[in-house]
Image (cartoon, rainbow, N blue to C red):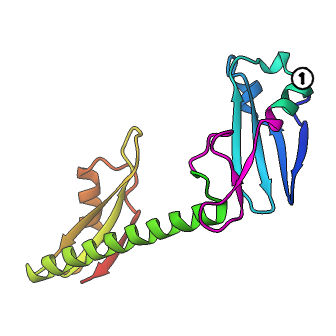
């Protein structure tokens, strides 16, 4: 059996791939051998999984073979090295980590702007109806479940007791997780 802390490296041109055994290989019976591969210097992580190879039966040669199967390509946008989607499955589609994360940042910024604009329109509608404050409160469901955010609009200064009453109606186990925004 191989050591849990084994690490292997492989140079491809100016890049270095470093493979380590993923903890799920020994933590979950029947999972199989899985390695995590780090790409330096451009960054990025990929995983290779050999479901048919039990961790207890794996050898260093198995890790070496998995690492050798990984190829790199030039990023489809900037030309930096990226994981070859033909040899290792990632959600990067041949982009380097910098370009992929840049795209995610742009998507996140656009989503945040859309949400902020939607909230601004809702605030304007409620202000036109005479509301003076918005209370953004996190509901922590009593008995478990995912927390969620609610926005409550009130006319006049919202009191702590009013907010707590509304949170109790929503069966929240926490009654002080909120902010107040004047409209």
Q: Residue at x 61, y 53 (%)?
A: 94
Q: Is residue 121 above or below residue 7?
A: below
Determine the main secondary structure of the stretch shown in magenta. loop
For disc 1, the marked residue is: 59
Instruction: Give how far across and how far down residue 134 sits, in percent.
Output: 26, 74
Position of residue 171 measured from the top left corner of the image (x, y, whole percent): 29, 47
Please tell me whether residue 100 belongs to the stretch shown in magenta: no
The quadrant of the image that shows the C terminus is: bottom left
Numbered range of the magenta stretch: 66-91
Instruction: Return the residue found at the far left.
Output: 129
- Viewed as shown, does residue 97 lie left or right of 175? right
Kindly identify the residue that appears in the image at 84 percent across and 47 percent down.
18
On the rendered structure, is 149 left or right of 69? left
Residue at image position (71%, 64%) is 80
> Viewed as shown, does residue 104 lie left or right of 127?
right
Q: Nearer the viewer, residue 114 or 138?
A: 114
Magenta stretch encompasses residue 83: yes
Residue 6 is situated, as x and y percent measured from the top left of the image, at 90, 36
Q: Position of residue 22 (x, y in %)?
A: 76, 35
Q: Nearer the viewer, residue 162 or 94?
A: 94
Work out whether residue 120 or residue 139 is closer to the camera in this orientation and state it: 120
What is the quadrant of the N terminus in the image? top right
* Residue 34 location, quadrant: top right
Please tell me which residue is depicted at 67% across the width and 40% down the height of the picture. 88
Regarding residue 155, the answer to whether it shows in the image is: no
């Amino acid at each position: 059996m191989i050591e849990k802390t084994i690490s292997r490296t492989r140079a491809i041109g100016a890049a270095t791939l470093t493979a380590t055994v993923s903890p799920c290989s020994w933590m979950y019976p029947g999972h199989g051998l899985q390695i995590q591969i780090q790409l330096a210097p451009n960054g990025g992580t990929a995983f290779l999984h050999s479901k048919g190879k039990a961790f207890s039966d794996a050898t260093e040669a198995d890790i070496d073979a998995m690492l050798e199967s990984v190829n790199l390509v030039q990023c489809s946008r900037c030309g930096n090295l990226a994981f070859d989607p033909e040899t290792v499955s990632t959600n990067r589609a041949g982009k380097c980590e910098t370009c992929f994360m840049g795209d995610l940042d742009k998507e996140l910024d656009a989503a945040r702007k859309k949400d902020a604009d939607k909230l601004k329109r809702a605030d304007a509608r409620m202000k036109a109806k005479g509301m003076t404050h918005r209370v953004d409160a996190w509901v922590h469901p009593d008995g478990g479940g995912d927390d969620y955010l609610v926005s409550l609009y009130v006319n006049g200064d919202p009191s702590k007791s009013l907010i707590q009453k509304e949170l109790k109606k929503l069966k929240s186990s926490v009654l002080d997780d909120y902010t107040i925004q004047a409209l």
